[in-house]
Image (tube, rainbow, N blue to C red):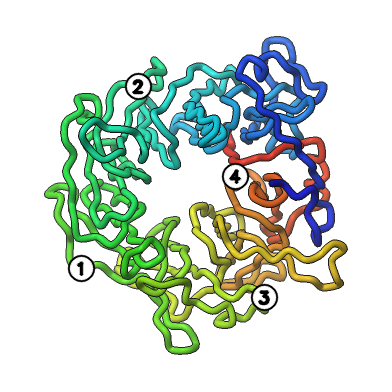
């Protein structure tokens, strides 16, 4: 399951992990690698990053580790217990709590535990069992409640799928609404509307949070094309819904406006498309980031009813991969695509995106085309994984030209991206499906791993999944 080392990149850690199935009690009692909590139970770190590790091996425990994000050093404290396989994390808007989902070893040993961590206490403050696995949960703007999409939750007399509400004060589930196959959630700025997106559906479920508590029905709005996410106007009157289109089994990726006052569509969908050098239209979008009025949209183009369609030879980078993904720049104020030709990135399903210092846009995917050379690697051998970095600036950053995509020589799925706000650094967790998820420290002035800073984390060993900064 885990390859013992990464090849082709100097300074990267070589990790061999033996997966052990430990009961929750064991996770609480064992120590981690000789580290012990200082008096009072706090790490004493001023600028913390939490990183989830989903395996236990030897003296190392599954849990949420604490990293000094100002100095790239692991904290001298045992990990926070958050289930047997902690993975995806969400920080509350007020930064007082971190929410962690632990799926367990599904389907053999499903756990589906939702843990609420007190950031001040650096300890679990509550656990809520979920009726199934989740890949999406959002938090109300006042940080009082979390809403979790559970697509496989059993519902009597109906198709599986719910959205469940959890009180972050009491640490208890407070209600649910039935949304068949609910997979992804987006919440508006005021917390008055939640949009739920279901697999293989061309409808959006519009939910009022109070309806989750009472169990009242939701409003379903059709006319979309495999929608997956939404961005909201500042007054919450309009949602800009991203249609995944062909990549998700539909027809064409696009942006569709939704009037949230009347729950009606505004105009027609605007395709998220460009034309490659064979005069073939390429449309794709599964994740986005908005900066000002600019929306950066990443996805892998597919032909409707078929497979991937954007040849990597469309771009300027030479690679052994046949098909690639694309980044599209969309102007929300004009509802139009800005770039006329594809910006070629890695393929795979893109679900991580963040803007770091110096205008460097980090884009992560899973199940991309991996290029792993033999061991020992030949001179100049290509190494390719699921991370792409795009220079959004109109001027060079160091040797990085404007509008250029860099694909670093590191393999594996990208499961966590976290820019460090006070530094020219971005933390990336990559390799979960290859050598065990590793935390990489990227310098945004070079778009490369900083070998010196990386070495400081050489004692951070595990199969890491997600990362969040807590204090800035």
Q: Is residue 434 visible?
A: yes
At numbered mark 4, what does the secondary structure look like: helix, strand or loop?
loop
**Contact check, label 4 and label 2, Cβ < 8 Å:** no
**What's the distance in space between the residues labelled 4 and 2, CA to CA?**
33 Å
Which percent across, then down, holds residue 427? 65, 47
Q: Quadrant of the C terminus?
A: top right
Q: Nearer the viewer, residue 330 or 243?
A: 243
- Identify the mark nearer the N-term, 3 or 2: 2
Find disc 3 in the rendering and name its residue: 319
- Identify the mark nearer the N-term, 2 or 1: 2
Which percent across, then down, holds residue 71? 75, 38
Badge number at residue 187: none
311 left or right of 338?
Answer: right
Label 2 or label 1, whichever lies nearer to me, is 2
- Residue name at image x 52 percent, y 74 percent: 343
- Residue name at image x 64 percent, y 50 percent: 433
**What's the distance in space between the residues labelled 2 and 1, CA to CA?**
39 Å
Which percent across, then down, holds residue 344? 55, 73
**Contact check, label 3 and label 2, Cβ < 8 Å:** no
Q: Is residue 100 visible?
A: no
Find disc 4 in the rendering and name its residue: 421
Label 4 or label 3, whichever lies nearer to me, is 3
**What's the distance in space between the residues labelled 3 and 1, CA to CA?**
37 Å
- Identify the mark nearer the N-term, 1 or 4: 1
Estimate how packed mark 4 is, as few (under 14), some (14 to 19) or many (20 or more) residues with alpha carbons within 10 Å.
Answer: some
**What's the distance in space between the residues labelled 4 and 3, CA to CA?**
33 Å
Find disc 2 in the rendering and name its residue: 173
Estimate how packed mark 1 is, as few (under 14), some (14 to 19) or many (20 or more) residues with alpha carbons within 10 Å.
Answer: few
**Contact check, label 1 and label 4, Cβ < 8 Å:** no
Estimate how packed mark 2 is, as few (under 14), some (14 to 19) or many (20 or more) residues with alpha carbons within 10 Å.
Answer: some
Height in image: 127 above or below 379?
Answer: above
């Amino acid at each position: 399951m885990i390859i013992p080392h990464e090849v082709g990149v100097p300074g990267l850690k070589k990790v061999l992990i033996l997966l052990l199935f430990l009961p929750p009690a064991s996770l609480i009692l064992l120590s981690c690698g000789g580290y012990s909590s200082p008096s009072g139970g706090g790490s004493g770190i001023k600028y913390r990053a939490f990183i989830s590790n989903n395996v236990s091996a030897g003296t190392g425990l599954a849990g949420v580790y604490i990293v000094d994000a100002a100095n790239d050093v692991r904290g001298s404290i045992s990990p926070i217990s958050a289930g047997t396989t902690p993975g995806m994390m969400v920080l509350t808007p007020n930064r007082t709590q971190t929410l962690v989902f632990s799926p367990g070893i599904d389907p053999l040993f499903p756990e589906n535990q939702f843990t609420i961590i007190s950031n001040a206490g650096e300890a679990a403050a509550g656990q809520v069992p979920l009726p199934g696995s989740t890949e999406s949960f959002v938090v109300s703007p006042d940080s009082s409640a979390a809403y979790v999409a559970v697509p496989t939750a059993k519902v009597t007399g109906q198709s599986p799928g719910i959205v469940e509400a959890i009180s972050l004060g009491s640490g208890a589930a407070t209600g649910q609404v039935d949304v068949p196959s609910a997979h992804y959630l987006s919440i508006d700025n005021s917390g008055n509307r939640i949009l739920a997106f279901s697999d293989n559906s061309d409808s959006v479920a519009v939910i009022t949070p109070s309806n989750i508590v009472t169990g009242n029905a939701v409003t379903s709005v059709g006319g979309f094309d495999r929608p997956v996410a939404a961005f909201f106007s500042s007054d919450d009157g309009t949602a800009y819904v991203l249609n995944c289109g062909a990549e998700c089994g539909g027809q064409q990726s696009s942006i569709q406006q939704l009037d949230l006052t009347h729950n009606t569509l505004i105009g027609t969908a605007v395709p998220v498309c460009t034309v490659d050098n064979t005069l073939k239209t390429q449309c794709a979008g599964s994740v986005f980031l908005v900066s000002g009025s600019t929306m950066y949209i990443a996805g892998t183009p597919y032909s409707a009813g078929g497979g991937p369609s954007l040849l990597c030879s469309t771009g300027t980078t030479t690679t052994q991969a046949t098909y690639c993904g694309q980044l599209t720049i969309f102007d929300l104020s004009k509802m139009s695509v800005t770039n006329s030709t594809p910006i070629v990135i890695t393929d795979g399903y893109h679900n991580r995106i963040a803007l770091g210092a110096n205008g460097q846009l980090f884009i992560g995917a899973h199940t991309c085309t991996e290029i792993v050379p033999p061991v020992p690697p030949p001179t100049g051998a290509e190494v390719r994984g699921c991370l792409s970095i795009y220079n959004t600036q109109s001027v060079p950053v160091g040797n990085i030209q404007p509008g250029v995509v860099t694909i670093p020589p590191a393999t594996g799925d990208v499961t966590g991206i976290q820019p460090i706000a006070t530094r020219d650094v971005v933390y990336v967790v990559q390799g979960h499906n290859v050598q065990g998820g590793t935390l990489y420290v990227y310098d945004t002035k070079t778009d490369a791993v900083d070998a010196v800073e990386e070495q400081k984390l050489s004692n951070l060993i595990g199969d890491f999944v997600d990362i969040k900064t807590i204090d800035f």
